[in-house]
């Protein structure tokens, strides 16, 4: 944009899909105007993506994410072993990976960056995400970050050992309206903090 006093102010937007394996360094760059010569870059900004561990994500949570993607125009990427039926949107993507343990988790952990949010109930994946500097949100609304992931991972490992030794530990409670509302509230809070 050129103002009346001749000062050039530019925002360069990079659109399009990055090939898999490309690390996002910045989605756009702000430039400082200069009286003579080229504009000087002043800030590189990375736009948050939401990565979803799609195989185990409950349908009500997917529906919340579908609406969010279009409402705030944020890219939501579903990663799954099997093809998911997703609505047509410029902000919803799907990566289908091969069948096998942790392949979807490995893909999410590889491509997410510090600013991203990952939706997963898989605590070991959440630990990998947090180690990269990102945050994870459980479909029941539990936020995993640096302050609690160590404790959550230790408890998960302890319960796994109990089950391995034959102790009946039970499973999670059923997924209902309360869990859906907890997730929606936690997601809204994260989005508001990131000022999308």
Image: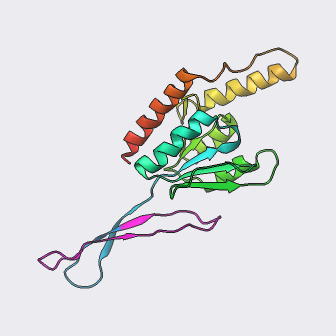
Q: Is residue 172 left or right of residue 177?
A: right
Over which residues does the magenta segment extend? 1-29
Q: In this view, does 105 lie above or below 145?
A: below
Q: Does the magenta stretch include residue 15?
A: yes
- All told, the count of numbered labels is 0
In the image, what residue occupies the spot 26% across and 85% down? 37
Q: In this view, does 184 lie to the left or right of 93?
A: left
Q: In this view, does 61 lie above or below 115?
A: above
Q: In which quarter of the image is the N terminus?
A: bottom left
In the image, what residue occupies the spot 67% across and 41% down? 125
Q: Is residue 94 left or right of residue 25?
A: right
Task: Give 51 or 157, whichever is nearer the viewer.
Answer: 51
Task: Give 82 or 125, whichever is nearer the viewer.
Answer: 82
In the image, what residue occupies the spot 44% across and 38% down? 190
Report the residue that reaches farthest toward the top. Answer: 168
Q: Can residue 34 be seen in this view?
A: yes
What is the x, y in percent for residue 110?
A: 65, 55
Q: Is residue 19 magenta?
A: yes
Q: Can residue 138 be seen in this view?
A: no
Toward which corner of the image does residue 38 lie, by quadrant?
bottom left
What is the x, y in percent for residue 109?
A: 65, 50
Report the residue that reaches farthest toward the left. Answer: 5
Tell me how the rendering is colored: rainbow
């Amino acid at each position: 944009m050129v103002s009346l006093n001749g000062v050039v102010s530019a925002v360069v937007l990079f659109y399009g899909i990055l090939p898999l394996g490309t690390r996002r360094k910045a989605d756009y760059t702000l430039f400082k105007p200069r009286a003579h010569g080229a504009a000087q870059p002043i800030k590189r900004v990375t736009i948050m993506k939401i990565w979803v561990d799609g195989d185990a994500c409950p349908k009500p949570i997917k529906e919340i994410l579908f609406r969010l993607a279009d409402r705030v125009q944020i890219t939501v990427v579903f990663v799954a072993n099997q093809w998911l039926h997703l609505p047509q949107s410029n902000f919803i993507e799907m990566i289908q990976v091969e069948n096998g343990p942790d392949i979807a988790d490995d893909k999410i952990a590889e491509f997410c960056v510090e600013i991203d949010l990952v939706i997963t109930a898989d605590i070991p994946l959440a630990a990998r995400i947090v180690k990269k500097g990102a945050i994870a949100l459980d479909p029941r609304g539990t936020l995993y970050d640096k302050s609690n992931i160590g404790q959550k991972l230790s408890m998960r490992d302890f319960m796994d050992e109990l089950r391995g030794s034959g102790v009946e530990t039970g499973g999670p409670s059923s997924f209902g309206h309360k869990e859906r509302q907890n997730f929606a509230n936690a997601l809204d809070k994260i989005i508001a903090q990131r000022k999308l």
